[in-house]
Amino acid sequence: MFDSLRKKISDAISSIVKSEEKGEPIPEAAQEATQDMHGEAVESTVEESIDLDKDLSDAEDKTVGQNVETEVTKIKPETAVYREEKKDEEKIAESRKNEKIRLSLSTKLKGAFSKQISLNQSDIDNFTDELMLTMLQSDVSYSTTEKFISSLKNSLADTKFESRNIRTGISECMKTELEKILEKGKPKEQLLQIVKAKLSEGMKPVTIMFLGPNGTGKTTTMAKIAHMFKNNGLSSVFSASDTFRAAAIEQTSFHASKIGIPVVKGNYGADPASVAFDAVEFAKAHSIDVVLVDTAGRQETNKNLLNEIKKMERVAKPDITIYVGESTAGNRIAEQIAEFIKYVKVDGIILTKLDCDAKGGNAISISDVTGLPIFFFGTGESYDALVPFDPSFVIGALVSN
Ligand SMILES: Nc1nc2c(ncn2[C@@H]2O[C@H](COP(=O)(O)OP(=O)(O)OP(=O)(O)O)[C@@H](O)[C@H]2O)c(=O)[nH]1
Ligand SMILES: [Mg+2]
C-alpha cells in the first residue's frame, strides 16, 4: 500500500547507510592523524574497523616496553573493548556484508574508535535534505514536511547511535517523529464504538453525514459503513441526498438493496436537506439505529455548494460528519479539508483508494494539519474493504528496519 513512500524512505536511509561507498578524499590533516596512530592511512569505514583493530593490536605489541606516544596510549582501552566484542562484530559484519557507512570522515573516525557515535551536522543535513525531497514527492505537504524534518534533525543530533547499527537507530528516530504526528490522527474511539455509545445514551437515531469532493468514494464508503454496522447488529437507513448527480439516487438504492437496508429518496433536483430530514423521521418512526446521509460531491472552492452543505448540517443535524477524501489526491487534501471545516464541523476522516497507487504521504499531513481522527482507509471496492486507521500500521509500512 505505502510501497512507493516506504521505498523512498528506505532509499533515503540507504543514502546514509549505503552498500557501495564511493571513495571520499581524506583531508590531509585527518590522514596525518590516522598515520600517526597506525603507521598507515586507514579507510575509515566501520567494516574496516575490524582490520583497524588488528592494526591497533599490532601497534600495541610493537610498543610494549617502549615510551609510547600519548595518542597510542589513549586508544588502548578502546582497543580492549573492541577485542571483547570481536565475536559480535563478526556476526554483524557477516550480516551486513558489503554495507559501509557513507558518513563524513570525522564521524567515521569516531565510529571506528567508539561503540557509539553521534552524527555530525553535515551528515544530518545531507540525509534530511534527501528525505525532505522524498516526503514532498510522496504527497506529504510542505508545512508538515518542514516541521517533521526540523524535529527529526534535533532528534538525530541528540541521539547516540550504535556504530554497528546506525540504520536501525535512524529508523527508530524517524518512527518516533512520525508517531508524534500520526498520533494526532488516531481516533480515541472507533466509529462503531462512538455510535454504540451514543445509542446507549438514548440518542436514536444517530445521524452520520458523508461529504467531500467529487468521486472520492462517499457513496461506496457509506455503503461499507452500513455493511459494518449490520454485521455488528446495528440497523441503518440511507438518505439518498445526492439529488444532483445523474444516477446517484439509483446508485444509493442499489447499495441499499444489496446490503438489505431501506433508503429514503426524493426526486433529482429536490432539496438534499429535506431528504435527510425525511430520512431521520423515517428512522424515528421505524426505530432504526443509524441514518447514513449521502451528499453530492463538491469542491472546496465552490462557496455555494459549501453553503448548501451548511444548510444540510442545520436541517439534518448530523451527530457525526465524515469527510471522505482520496488517499491518491496528493498533498492538497489537508488544505481542502481545512476549507470544508470553515463551513461545517467535521468529526473525522476516511481516506479511500489506498489500494490505488496511493503514496500514503497525505495521511501524515492530514493528521498534522487537521488534527482530526482518521477513522478508516478504504482499500477496495468491496463492502469489507475498510481498514481502521492505526498509526503503527502506517509507520511500520513506511519505515522498515
Ligand atoms: N479501488 C477503490 N475504489 C474505490 C474505493 N472507494 C470507492 N471506490 C470507487 O470509486 C468510484 C467512485 O465512488 P463513489 O462512491 O461513487 O464516489 P462518490 O464520492 O460518491 O462520487 P460522487 O457522488 O460522484 O461525488 C467507484 O467506482 C467506487 O467503486 C476504494 O477504497 N478503493
Ligand atoms: Mg456519491
Image: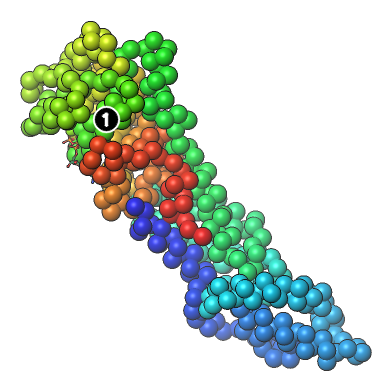
Q: Quadrant location of residue 336? A: top left
Percent position of residue 228, x then y: 31, 30
Residue carrying label 1: 227
Is 211 on the left-hand or right-hand side of 360? left
Q: Residue at x 58, y 76 (%)?
A: 94
Q: Is mark 1 within 8 Å of ligand 1?
A: no
Is 13 on the left-hand or right-hand side of 357? right
Percent position of residue 345, x then y: 35, 24
Ligand 1 quadrant? Answer: top left
- Categorize mark 1 by other alpha carbons within 10 Å: few (<14), some (14-19), many (20+): many
Residue toward you, 96 or 69: 96
Q: Residue at x 29, y 44 (%)?
A: 379
Does dot 1 land on a helix, a strand or a loop? helix
Q: Quadrant location of residue 370? A: top left
Residue toward you, 248 or 201: 201
Residue toward you, 271 or 291: 291
Q: Residue at x 23, y 40 (%)?
A: 382
Say how many tags the image has. Answer: 1
Q: Residue at x 48, y 69 (%)?
A: 15
Examine the rendering and report whether any part of residue 335 can be seen.
no
| Colour theme | rainbow
**Residue type beneath disc 1:** His
Q: Is residue 181 above or below residue 245?
A: below
